[in-house]
């Protein structure tokens, strides 16, 4: 039975496969370079051919993932290049490749920062995104000028942004700059704090809260909320690293200044879930996940799907085995389709209820007319039959 589950554990993730994936920019290469420079982003290039099997699989199964789209749409200008299309011959001559797919990250000046040959799964592609951002360290361009005493507002702001982008701490430079009492406008102060308040447990974040009303008038709301979440998440992660749960409580309290009670409550559950995962306290993680399920996610499959995906990673824990059974059953109750039924059947199998797993898996067959989906379900059923 354990063999069955390990083979089919991917079914736990099938419900969240389709979402808002990567959005590829449709401009010319010249326009793509200009856009990258303007937005100060790297370009992600999928160099492919129409006959390449791994290219097709990535386009269908990886680029379409919501988790991938969220990262790549935010961090990069994304471009697809058919390396055999006549219109792309200029690109091909400058960036030749020997195998497909070849994934490239290129800056606005046209320099290749990172090249990777071969298809990637979701985790591998996300790891590349993290790796390339660290390689694209532009903070060194500011170091000499800052050491020489350059305290021009735009220069310091650019330095802080460059440090933040590669995960280097900008807190000292930000605090030192404000201690110097620079002659800057209110709008400039607002913009500075939005970039500088990178951790919720900091005086800079307290200043961000104090100027919230002013900042909301001048800064894009979604951009601000994203930065607030990142700062709070960073403090939660710090709490997990040093096993200080008070930091989690502080992050949740700071988050509540920018969101209503409902959203703050949801963030509080997620923050503690991340804390317990990070500290290896899986029983506690199971308990808080159960509360999150009951109070937040129970009737919302958009919240249930990622919860189930995360729980599946800790499926050897007895509490989580039971919780997977409860959550996947509820997922089916909310929406009875073949994916949700198979996810529930897998949880039943994990909990040793093979007859019920067979019943639910058989029902899943009636929920789809697509041969590929029926084939996958039938393979699952045969695995159950071989162990009964």
Image (cartoon, helix red, strand yellow):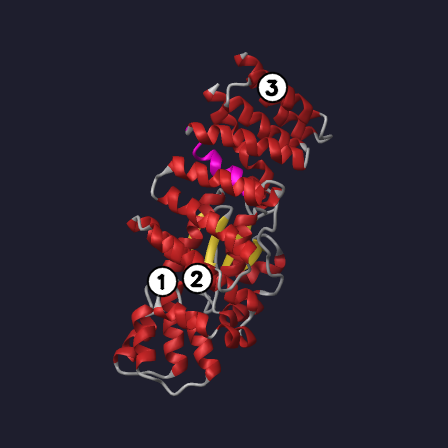
Residue at 29% x, 50% y is 242
Residue 132 visible in the shown view: no
N-terminal label among 3 and 2: 2
Q: Alpha carbon of mark 3 to alpha carbon of mark 1: how far?
A: 49 Å
Task: Give coordinates of residue 135: x percent, y percent.
Answer: 36, 59
Of all residues, the one furthest to the bottom in this rendering is: 183
In this view, 169 is above or below 182: above
Secondary structure of the residue carrying numbered label 1: loop
Of all residues, the one furthest to the top in this rendering is: 388
Query: Callout 1: 10 Å neighbours few (<14), some, many (20+)?
Result: many
In this view, 183 is above or below 111: below
N-terminal label among 1 and 2: 1
The mark closer to the camera, 3 or 2, is 2
* Left or right, residue 13 beside residue 339: left
Q: Alpha carbon of mark 1 to alpha carbon of mark 2: how far?
A: 8 Å
Res. 220 image quadrant: bottom right
Of all residues, the one furthest to the left in this rendering is: 147
Secondary structure of the residue carrying numbered label 3: helix
N-terminal label among 3 and 1: 1
In this view, 22 is above or below 219: above
For label 1, the residue is: 201
The mark closer to the camera, 3 or 1, is 1
Q: Alpha carbon of mark 3 to alpha carbon of mark 2: how far?
A: 46 Å
Quick check: marks 1 and 2 in contact, CB under 8 Å?
Answer: yes
Residue 256 visible in the shown view: yes
For label 3, the residue is: 356
Query: Callout 2: 10 Å neighbours few (<14), some, many (20+)?
Result: many
Query: Callout 3: 10 Å neighbours few (<14), some, many (20+)?
Result: some
Q: Which residues are magenta?
A: 306-316
């Amino acid at each position: 039975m354990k063999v069955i589950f390990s083979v089919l554990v991917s079914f736990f993730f099938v419900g969240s496969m389709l979402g808002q994936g990567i959005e590829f920019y449709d401009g010319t290469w010249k326009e793509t370079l200009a856009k990258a420079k303007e937005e100060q982003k790297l370009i992600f290039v999928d160099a492919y051919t129409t006959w390449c099997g791994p290219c097709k699989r990535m386009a269908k199964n990886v680029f379409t993932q919501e988790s991938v789209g969220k990262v790549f749409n935010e961090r990069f200008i994304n471009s697809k290049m058919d390396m055999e299309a006549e219109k792309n011959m200029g690109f091909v001559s400058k960036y030749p490749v020997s195998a497909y797919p070849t994934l490239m990250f290129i800056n606005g000046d046209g320099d290749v920062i990172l090249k990777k040959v071969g298809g990637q799964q979701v985790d591998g592609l996300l790891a590349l995104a993290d790796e390339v951002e660290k390689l694209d360290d532009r903070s060194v361009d500011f170091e000499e000028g800052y050491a020489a005493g350059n305290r021009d507002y735009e220069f310091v702001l650019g330095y802080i942004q460059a440090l933040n982008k590669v995960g280097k701490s900008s807190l000292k430079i930000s605090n030192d700059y404000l201690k110097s009492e620079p002659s800057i406008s209110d709008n400039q102060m607002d913009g500075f704090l939005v970039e500088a308040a990178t951790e919720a447990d900091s005086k800079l974040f307290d200043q961000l809260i104090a100027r919230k009303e002013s900042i909301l008038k001048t800064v894009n709301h979604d951009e601000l909320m994203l930065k607030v979440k990142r700062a709070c998440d960073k403090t939660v992660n710090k709490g997990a690293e040093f096993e200080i749960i008070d930091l989690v409580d502080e992050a949740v309290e700071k988050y509540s200044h920018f969101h209503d009670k409902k959203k703050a409550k949801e963030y509080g559950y997620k923050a503690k879930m991340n804390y317990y995962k990070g500290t290896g306290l899986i029983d506690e993680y199971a308990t808080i996940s159960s509360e999150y399920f009951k109070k937040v996610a129970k009737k919302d499959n958009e919240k249930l799907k990622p919860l189930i995906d995360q729980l599946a990673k800790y499926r050897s824990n007895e509490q989580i085995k039971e919780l997977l059974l409860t959550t996947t059953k509820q997922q089916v109750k909310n929406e009875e389709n073949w994916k949700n039924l198979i996810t529930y059947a897998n949880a039943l199998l994990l909990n040793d209820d093979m007859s019920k797993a067979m019943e639910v898996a058989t029902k899943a067959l009636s929920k789809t007319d697509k041969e590929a989906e029926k084939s996958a379900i039938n393979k699952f059923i045969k695995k159950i039959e071989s162990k009964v």
